[in-house]
Image (tube, helix red, strand yellow):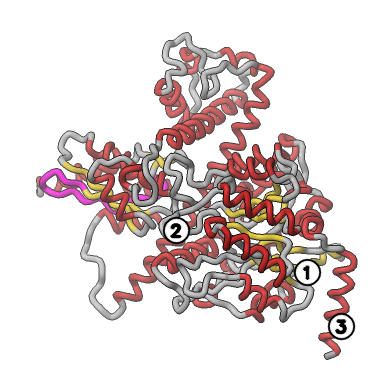
Amino acid sequence: MFITPTGEEVFVIDGHTHFWDGSPANQLNVHGKQFIDCFYAYHTSLSPPDKLWPKEQFEKYSAEQMYRDLFVDGPDDMAIVQSTYLTEFYKNGFNTIDRNAEMAKRYKDRFIVNGAFDPRDGERALEYIHYMKETFGIKGVKLYTAEWKGDSRGWKLTDPNAYRCFELCDKLGIKNIHVHKGPTIIPLDKDAFDVHDVDHAATDFQGLNFIIEHCGLPRLDDFCWIAVQETNVYGGLAVALPFIHGRPRYFAEVISELLFWVGEDKILFGSDYAIWTPRWLVEKFWNFELPGDLKQEHGVDLTPQAKKKILGLNAARLYGVDVEAQKAKLKKGLYASAAG
Amino acid sequence: MNAPLLQHDLRTSEVWGRLALVTDPELDESVTELGFVELVTVDDDGGVDIVFRLPTYWCSANFAFLMADDMRRAVSSLPWVREARPQLRDHMVAEEINRGVSEGRSFGDALKDFASGGSLDEVRDKFRRKAFERRQETMLLALREAGHDDQAICQMNLNTYDTINFGTGEAARQKSRYRELLVERRLAELPGDQAFVTYDGRPIKRNELAAHLRRLRGVRVNMEFNSSLCRGLLAARYRELEADRAERTAGSAPACGGCGGGCAMRSARLPATGGEHSAAIA
């Protein structure tokens, strides 16, 4: 729970968190090292100096630490924990659903565990979706289109096998498709971060919500064009939000663009934990005001109501979380643990 | 006086001068200004080695290839250069790209292990368009700022454009860069041609200008954002590399053998700031 300077309670769902193991012991090859190194570069280049972690801690952290950073020291009420397999880079995967679910079950009512699938697995991908639904009751998945597999260096949401997976997700009520656009090498004649496949998939699967993580960065402009046309496309703020510290003017421009094209009902807060911790992000976001010239130019504003939607209410709607009931449940849980 | 050494320095700085003209297609900024080029070495036989590194191991292979190829071409255009050898370091497909560029192969050919065929023309054009739009927005906003009304801007010809003095800021920098793309794309060539048209060559009507500018702003915000992200990631990556090196060489002889330019470049880059870097080149 985030308490504003005026004492108001704001319900926070952290839309994008990870419980990974990127440690050298788990790295399979140089790509595994480079992957976590790249994350660490994001961490060090955009965090305030007093929030920096040592590399070793960043590579692998405990469930207790995650719980403390998000819910005790941090303002999160709930967090969506995403699964990313990367089994070509990491011996036991980077953060599989099994690892995430194992962690989540220790902290009742706190985590929404999302799955992941790889359409290139064909029939096995469909079986795996069934397995995740039955075993973990997932309501969402995180897809990483740049994941390597054998000789393949990426896939598209419009691939026929991906469409078969979406059909099944729709049928099973796995409504929230989080998409992370990493750099793909193929097709060779396309922009490696092209987001246009989102457009087609969103049109063809009106029953699904497509949450584009990092707002399509580095293709924010293309993403805005797509989001304005597709009612079921959302933007996740992870990576864009940390700019609020070092480059507040850039952040103001970015959030203005998003508010204008995408709208306050379709933007989701995410810390991208453990790349960043949520406390400073939420505090700075709540205290942030759009500069007057941008307000005027765009005809938008980042009102307290808009902030509440972005920080939690939008995600609550997508995941069917009854905010008041959830608050009551969490309070009861806290009293119970305090009494215990 | 040491004449060969002087000539050597002169050649090195000529190479930096050519490299400064190579841009990152995604950011429309110079690869030297961005701090991507780490080291230039000129040998006595007209061979030039250019070591460069991108902000991450995962940066788009397309762009990495384009930059390496553009560096090779730009440096090869110096009359005394016999062979220019760009070497991309610490990248997921560094080996394939370096080999492909040195052999003058196409991107599709160089990375054919991943997929067959494919050319970069479409992607090159997409980012040419974004570069054009970003430069155009800068000029349009500068003209409005200077008091030109929308009607006058939409009707302005190249001759008038050329006569306007934009002082010393970003608009002054982009004035010739915008013009270059107008000519390259054959959108305006003669003094009487309209200076402001869309990338597809359509005139911009006065009542369309506001909507046009709104779209261009999205392009600019995106590019500036990426540029800021890339500089931050590159600086972070160098800090890591330096830490790694320090760890490896701790207790042994100093790693630096006195390479001159390279170290000056590197120390000027932390934190990555174009201004200091340019100063180091000059």
Q: Residue at the spot x=41%, y=20% of the render?
A: B183
Q: Residue at the spot x=40%, y=37% of the render?
A: B120
Circle number at residue A42 = none
Q: Residue at the spot x=50%, y=31% of the render?
A: B129
State how far apart marks 3 and 2 are (Cα).
46 Å
Chain under disc 2? B
Chain under disc 3? A
Residue under circle 3?
A335
Q: Secondary structure at mark 2?
A: helix
- Magenta span covers which residues? B32-48
Residue under circle 1?
A77
Chain under disc 1? A
Q: Residues within 10 Å of mark 3 (few under 14, many from 20)?
A: few
| Residue extending farthest bottom | A340
Q: Secondary structure at mark 3?
A: helix
Residue A260 falls in which quadrant of the image?
Answer: top right
Q: Residue at the spot x=33%, y=70% of the render?
A: B245
